[in-house]
Structures are given as structure tokens and as C-alpha cells.
């Protein structure tokens, strides 16, 4: 997929803290906007140096993007001028992010209807899985490489035993029903009706 000629892509990484701050929908829309801007910025830099262009569990930014380009896509004769009018974004879902840097169209269930959206979904999933493997090395007690952060019985058991790590989203059930101290240890839990 990423070795195909003329491919440019960007992946936005939005932290658990940011998701908890603005909610998952707004974080998703923010990430889409960041990714589109990332591709546009790649073209405007004309091969300029990109600093820290890697997904890593060690990064401390609240949100960031990583970009990629295939050798054929890096050919300057094919690069657009990077103005918003040179781009058109296809958005998976029924909402278009505010302040998109280019024209766009939302497509409900777009990952099954449009190849480019499906490809973007694969790149995002592979990026997330790789990041979960890195987080597993950092927080091995949660076995993130196995369940990729989904709320399996084993994962929730690990959270109850070890508390929440900095990458756990506190606004998602069942964590949203728990109270944590500053180290992530569970200090209280609301009964769910």
C-alpha cells in the first residue's frame, strides 16, 4: 500500500488526554483535519526536512502527525502547489471537520465504498497496532500487544490490578466510572445500574 507510486499520506496521533478533553468524535475530526494538513504541508515543503517524523510511545506531544511519501511521489514535477484548491479530501463518516484546509466530502461507511478511504483506514490501523506494541514494552503489565487496548476481560482485569496508565482514556467505560489518584491507582468506583 505505502509502496505504490505517487502516494502521500499522513497519520494523526491524538493523545488519550486530548480525547478525554474534547471527546472521541471531536478528536477524530481534529485528527482528520491534521492529517489532510500534513499531506498539504509535505507538498509545500518540496522535500524539506521533517523533524521527528515517527510514531513512538516515547513522544510527549498531545497530538502530532507523521507523514510518508513513496519515491515516485517525491518527484517535484508531480507536486501540487499545496494551496487548498489543489486538494479534495474524502472523509469517512457523516461529518466534515471544521476548518478543513481544502474542499471535502463525507461518505458514510466510506472505508467500504471508496478505495482511498479504505487504504487510509488500513494505514491508521497498522499505525495504531504498532504504537500499541511500543506501549506494551512501556507498560507490559497491561499486555497491550495482545488486545491492542480494547476493553477485553484480561485488559480490564489488568486495569483493576495495576490502575490506569497515562495512555488510558478516563472518559471511556468502564474507566469513566472509576476514580483514580494522580498515579492512576483506582481509589473509588461508582456502581453501575
Image: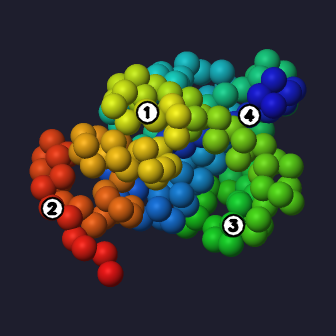
Residue occupied by mark 3: 93
Q: Earlier in the sequence, mark 2 or mark 3?
A: 3
- Secondary structure of the residue carrying tag 2 is strand
Is residue 102 visible in this depiction of the protein? yes
Q: Earlier in the sequence, mark 3 or mark 4?
A: 4
Residue at x-position 86% and y-position 60%:
113
Residue occupied by mark 2: 188
- Secondary structure of the residue carrying tag 4 is strand
Instruction: State the separation of the CA atoms marked 1 and 4.
Output: 33 Å
Residue occupied by mark 1: 143
Front label number (2 vs 3)? 2
Q: In the drawing, what numbered circle is on residue 70?
A: none
Q: In the drawing, what numbered circle is on residue 8?
A: 4
- Secondary structure of the residue carrying tag 1 is loop
Residue at x-position 12% and y-position 55%:
187
Is residue 10 visible in this depiction of the protein? no
Residue 95 image offset from top left, x and y in percent:
64, 71
Amino acid at each position: 500500500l505505502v509502496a505504490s507510486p505517487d502516494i502521500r499520506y499522513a497519520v494523526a496521533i491524538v493523545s488519550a488526554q486530548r480525547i478525554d478533553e474534547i471527546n472521541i468524535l471531536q478528536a477524530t475530526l481534529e485528527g482528520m483535519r491534521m492529517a489532510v494538513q500534513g499531506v498539504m504541508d509535505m507538498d509545500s515543503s518540496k522535500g524539506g526536512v521533517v523533524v521527528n517524523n515517527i510514531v513512538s510511545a516515547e513522544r510527549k506531544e498531545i497530538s502530532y502527525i507523521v507523514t510518508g511519501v513513496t519515491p515516485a511521489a517525491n518527484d517535484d514535477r508531480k507536486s501540487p502547489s499545496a494551496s487548498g484548491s489543489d486538494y479534495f479530501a474524502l472523509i469517512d463518516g457523516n461529518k466534515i471537520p471544521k476548518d478543513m484546509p481544502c474542499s471535502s466530502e463525507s461518505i458514510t461507511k466510506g472505508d467500504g465504498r471508496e478505495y482511498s478511504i479504505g487504504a487510509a483506514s488500513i494505514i491508521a490501523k497498522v499505525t495504531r497496532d504498532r504504537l500499541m506494541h511500543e506501549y506494551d514494552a512501556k507498560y507490559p503489565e497491561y499486555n497491550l500487544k495482545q488486545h491492542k487496548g480494547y476493553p477485553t476481560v484480561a485488559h480490564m482485569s489488568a486495569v483493576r490490578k495495576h490502575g490506569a496508565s497515562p495512555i488510558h482514556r478516563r472518559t471511556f467505560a468502564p474507566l469513566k466510572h472509576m476514580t483514580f489518584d494522580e498515579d492512576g491507582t483506582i481509589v473509588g468506583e461508582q456502581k453501575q445500574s
